[in-house]
Amino acid sequence: MLLGLLPFALNSAYASTLRECGETMIPMIASFAAMFGNLLLNYVLIFGHLGFAPMGASGAAVATVISRYLEFGIVLVRAHGNTEKFPFAKKLYRGFRIPARLFKQMLVKALIQITSYSIIKHTS
């Protein structure tokens, strides 16, 4: 199920941005497609239809992860496919870089927090 976390998080970000831009149909259609895909894949993977071996609960997990990627794929293609309507998607990942000095500061603070949490957790 952890594999489905990334597309879920990214889809949430993209879908909420699209809704804020007034485009509510794309996230809704993507959600319906994911729901239908999950329903179909649950039938196939849980009970072992169409040549697949029955997987039970594991099949439900696999179906959910695949449907999350389907949902994110639809939203991603629609958002980046129409950059005139959604100009935010044009050069979205060009400046996706954290300066080394800022990264070092964040890392030091995180290590301090992790260390203090570990000490408190193990001493109590």
Image (spheres, helix red, strand yellow):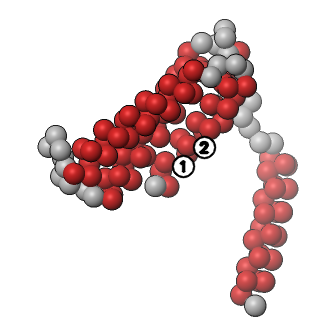
Q: Which label belongs to residue 13?
A: none
Residue 44 or 81: which is nearer the viewer? Answer: 44
Query: Can residue 114 be seen by looking at this rendering?
Result: yes
Q: Going by the image, does 54 lie left or right of 82?
A: left
**Relative height, residue 53 to residue 12 (above, below):** below
Q: Secondary structure at mark 1?
A: helix
Q: Are marks 1 and 2 in contact (CB under 8 Å)?
A: yes
Quarter of the view holding residue 55: bottom left
Q: Alpha-carbon distance for marks 1 and 2? A: 6 Å
Q: Amino acid at mark 1?
A: Leu
Residue 4: x and y in percent read 49, 48
Mark 2 Cα shell of 10 Å, populated few (<14), some (14-19), many (≥20): few
Tally the marks.
2
Q: Residue at x 50, y 55 (%)?
A: 2
Q: Residue at x 73, y 79 (%)?
A: 118
Residue 59: x and y in percent read 31, 53
Which quadrant is home to the C terminus?
bottom right
Residue 5: x and y in percent read 54, 49
Q: Going by the image, does 78 lie left or right of 124?
A: left
Residue 27: x and y in percent read 57, 27
Query: Can residue 75 be seen by looking at this rendering?
Result: no
Quarter of the view holding residue 80: top right
Q: Amino acid at mark 2?
A: Ala
Q: Which residue is mark 2?
A: 9
Q: Going by the image, does 94 lie left or right of 81?
A: right
Q: Going by the image, does 123 lie left or right of 23?
A: right
Q: Which residue is mark 1?
A: 5
Q: Residue at x 39, y 53 (%)?
A: 61
